[in-house]
């Protein structure tokens, strides 16, 4: 028999697993070194935003990403030509579901709130993107709609569909 420990523990709260004293000690330890780690890990020369290298400020950035792991929008992939060597047409359908748009905007606003609250406010200088001029949800959504892309890869765009269209060997059935 094999046994494994899951990497994800989503069904238990910390108080279900730790004594109150142990949890308090861990929180106290984390709070006492938070400034050190926030400063150490926040000044990264990398940048993940949409602005090109030639126009953005040459400085270090702290980056908070809002990433969807289970988006409700569903993309589509279509054959582009009769040639199997030609790339397919991929429509990831970003933000096709209104909940995805609302959740992304809310995540950006939540990240802003956290950056301007203790203890992160001690290392936060200013916001580069979307920028302080975008304050309302509508303004943030307008900005995001022009720059939003996938987090490195599209997922869920190649459904197997019904068996009469795709065989179990994942070979398309010609109709």
Image (cartoon, helix red, strand yellow):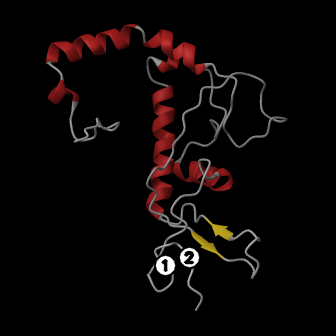
Q: Which residue is mark 1?
A: 167
- Expressed as whole percent of the image width and height from the top left, the position of residue 107 reads 47, 43
Where's the C terminus, which quadrant?
A: bottom right
- In the image, what residue occupies the spot 46% across and 57% down? 71
Does residue 3 sit above or below 164 in this rendering? above
Q: Residues within 10 Å of mark 1 (few under 14, many from 20)?
A: few
- Tell me, yes or no, whether the two marked residues, 2 and 1, touch with CB atoms within 8 Å: yes
Q: Which residue is mark 2?
A: 171
Q: Nearer the viewer, residue 40 or 85?
A: 85
Residue 3 vs residue 135: left or right?
Answer: left
Residue 123 in view, yes or no? no
Residue 143 vs residue 170: left or right?
Answer: right
Q: How many numbered discs sit on the rendered protein? A: 2
Q: Residues within 10 Å of mark 2 (few under 14, many from 20)?
A: few
- In the image, what residue occupies the spot 77% across and 71% down? 86
Does residue 87 sit above or below 8 in this rendering? below
- In the image, what residue occupies the spot 55% across and 67% down? 75
Does residue 86 sit above or below 27 in this rendering? below
- Expressed as whole percent of the image width and height from the top left, the position of residue 30 reads 36, 13
Q: Nearer the viewer, residue 134 or 109?
A: 109
Indicate the secondary structure of the residue bearing disc 2. Answer: loop
Q: Nearer the viewer, residue 162 or 30?
A: 162
Q: Residue furthest front?
A: 1
- In the image, what residue occupies the spot 43% across and 19% down? 118
- Expressed as whole percent of the image width and height from the top left, the position of residue 108 reads 52, 42
């Amino acid at each position: 028999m094999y046994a494994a420990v899951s990497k994800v523990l989503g069904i238990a709260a910390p108080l279900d697993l730790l004594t109150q004293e142990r949890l308090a000690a861990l929180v106290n330890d984390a709070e006492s070194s938070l400034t050190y780690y926030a400063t150490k890990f926040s000044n990264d020369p990398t940048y993940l935003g949409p602005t090109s290298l030639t126009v953005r400020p040459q400085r270090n950035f702290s980056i908070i990403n809002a990433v969807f792991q289970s988006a409700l929008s569903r993309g589509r992939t279509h054959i582009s030509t009769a040639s199997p060597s030609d790339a397919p047409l991929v429509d990831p359908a970003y933000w096709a579901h209104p909940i995805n748009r609302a959740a992304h905007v809310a995540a950006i606003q939540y990240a802003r709130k956290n950056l301007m609250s203790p203890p992160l406010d001690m290392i936060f200088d200013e916001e580069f993107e979307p920028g302080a001029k975008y304050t309302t949800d509508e303004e943030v959504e307008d900005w995001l709609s022009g720059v939003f892309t996938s987090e490195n890869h599209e997922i869920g765009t190649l459904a197997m569909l019904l068996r009469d269209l795709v065989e179990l060997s994942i070979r398309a059935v010609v109709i």
